[in-house]
Structures are given as C-alpha cells and as structure tokens.
Image (cartoon, rainbow, N blue to C red):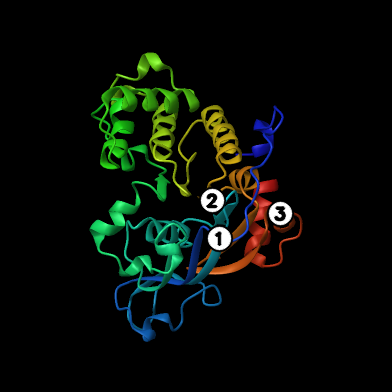
C-alpha cells in the first residue's frame, strides 16, 4: 500500500520525543531448536538462510538491538520470515527469547530483564506499561464478547471496579477510534475486519501504556479500510506520546508511522537509520530491493 495515497489531510503535530528510553532491547535472540552456538553457524543474510545446516534449528532473530524513547515510533521491516514479528512477540512476552536483555523504563526503572520474569509476571505487564495490537484481531480480542466488554477486561484486571466508570472509559476509547457507540454492546464477532482492528486499538490504549507494539496492524484489510486505520494510528501516536514499535513488511506503513527503522533479513538487522533517509538512500542491497518494490 502506498501511504501517500492516504495523506489527504494535514498530519497531526508529532508528539515531543522525550529524553531517555522507554523500551530498550539488547542482543535479543530467538532460536527454534538447538539453542547452542553451532546453530548460528552458516545462518544469516550472508548465507541466505535462517536454517542452521549444522543442527536444523531456525535462527529466527539474533543480536537485535534498539531503543525507543517516549513519543517516538520505531519501525521494523522485512519480508515474511525475516524475524521482525519474532522480535515483537519476544518483547510482548508471547514468546521466550533465547538470549538478550529486554527492559522497560516503567518496570523497576529499567533494571529488570523481562526475560527473567515468570509468565504470570510478563502477562501482568500487559495491564499497564505494555500493550500490543496484532495483525489478526482475534489474537488481541475475545470475539465472543462485546466491544465494551473487551475494553472492560484490561480495566478490571488493573483494578477498576466501578461499572459506570468502566463503561464511560470504554465509550471514550471507542469514540476515540471512531467505533459508533451504538455498537458498544454488540459482539465483536459481528464487526468487520477494520472495525475489529479499531476495537483492538482501543483495548490496547485502555490503561495508557507507555509502550505500544503494533504487529502488521493493517495487513489483510482492504486498501481503503487500511488507510483509515493508518490515519487513526498516526493521529493516536502523535497525541499520546507513547513509545511505539511498528512491525510491517510494507514501507508505506513504516514511512507513515515511524521516525527510525530497522531492516531485518534472515533473522538479522542488516540496516538501521532514520526512516526518511533510508527510503531516500538505502545502503544494503536488501534494503534497496525493499525500497524499490515500495516505490514501484
């Protein structure tokens, strides 16, 4: 999708990027199979594969480093199998990283490696400091309950008890993502794909997270619906000042939402820089190919 086709209105003023980081990832790695050092041999962009010839393991991501500041959006781009979504799932706690350090400023002032937390503790992070929006809304929503009920879930888990306040907060968030309040008590299963994605975004924002993870948020949507969701996300990121990581295979999405970008291929980062500069002058042959396809 070409993001420029959606840019028909004046962009909201970007949120101020505050000093310091909200999310810091160092040396992140995820191997499916034998996690030993032999699995790394013969893998990566220079070998054209993430599959270890020595052990048969898949090195889905390795030695990934980045920081994201409050008010900043970082993109991670690559084709299917590049490792970008694996990185996102490791940060979100959906998968256990094999190696590396993941820190949130909002958790013990960034001194705790999230890899060391128990699964229950990792799930608890999703109540406040961290939230995720998935490509498939079914991964982030309960399709069998109402739109309002989906938003009530993280609120009640975070300690909200007053029914009227919960309902008011749900109505506020649904309005913010342009879901008609007349649909608040409808089961999400009856919604269109684009409307489900908007409800998922509202749910992710329920407890004002400091870090928002977006994994292919418009893939699978019709072009016009995707354009509307992208416009919504651009506005919300500008207004909230949240630190965001946007994972996509589409440079149009990355260009519209992010300031900096990492390019991944065969589980490794092959290039990193400012989004606009990388789009104008990509250095790595793989980045050049991605940009050429986006411009074509």
Question: Looking at the figure, which quarter contains the N terminus?
Answer: top right
Q: Secondary structure at mark 2?
A: strand
What crowding class fits label 3: few (fewer than 14 Cα within 10 Å), some (14-19), or many (20 or more)? many
What crowding class fits label 1: few (fewer than 14 Cα within 10 Å), some (14-19), or many (20 or more)? some
> Residue at left 62%, top 44%?
252
Q: Nearer the viewer, mark 2 or mark 3?
A: 2
Q: Badges 2 and 3: C-beta atoms under 8 Å apart? A: no
Q: Position of residue 198 (x, y in %)?
A: 44, 31
Sequence-wise first label, 1 or 2:
1
> Residue at left 63%, top 58%?
19
C-alpha separation, residue under disc 1 versus residue under disc 3:
25 Å
Looking at the picture, tell me which residue is in the foreground, 14 or 192: 14
Q: Secondary structure at mark 3?
A: helix
> Residue at left 34%, top 75%?
57
From the image, tell me which residue sits under label 2.
243
Residue 200: image quadrant is top left
C-alpha separation, residue under disc 2 versus residue under disc 3:
22 Å
From the image, tell me which residue sits under label 3.
279
Sequence-wise first label, 2 or 3:
2
């Amino acid at each position: 999708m070409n993001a420029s086709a959606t840019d028909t209105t004046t962009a909201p003023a970007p949120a101020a990027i505050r000093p310091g980081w909200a999310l810091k990832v160092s040396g992140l790695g995820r191997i499916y199979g034998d996690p030993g050092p032999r699995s790394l041999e013969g893998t990566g962009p220079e070998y054209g594969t993430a599959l270890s010839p020595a052990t048969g393991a898949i090195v889905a991501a390795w030695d990934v480093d980045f920081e994201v500041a409050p008010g900043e959006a970082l993109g991670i781009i690559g084709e299917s199998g590049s490792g970008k979504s694996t990185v996102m799932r490791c940060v979100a706690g959906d998968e256990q990283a094999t190696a590396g350090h993941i820190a949130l400023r909002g958790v013990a002032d960034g001194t705790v490696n999230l890899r060391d937390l128990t699964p229950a503790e990792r799930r608890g992070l999703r109540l406040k400091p961290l939230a995720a929006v998935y490509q498939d809304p079914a991964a982030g929503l309960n399709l069998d309950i109402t739109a309002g009920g989906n938003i009530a879930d993280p609120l009640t888990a975070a300690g909200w008890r007053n029914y009227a306040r919960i309902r008011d907060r749900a109505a506020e968030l649904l309005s913010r993502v342009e879901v008609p309040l007349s649909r608040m008590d409808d089961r999400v299963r009856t919604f269109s794909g684009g409307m489900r994605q908007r409800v998922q975004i509202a749910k992710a924002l329920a407890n004002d997270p400091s870090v928002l993870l977006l994994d292919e948020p418009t893939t699978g949507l019709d072009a016009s619906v995707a354009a509307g969701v992208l416009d919504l996300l651009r506005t919300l990121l500008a207004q909230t000042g949240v630190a965001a990581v946007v994972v996509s295979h589409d440079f149009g999405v990355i260009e519209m939402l992010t300031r900096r970008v990492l390019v991944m291929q065969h589980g490794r980062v092959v290039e990193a820089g400012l989004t606009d500069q990388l789009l104008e002058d990509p250095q790595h042959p793989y980045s050049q190919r991605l940009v050429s396809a986006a411009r074509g």
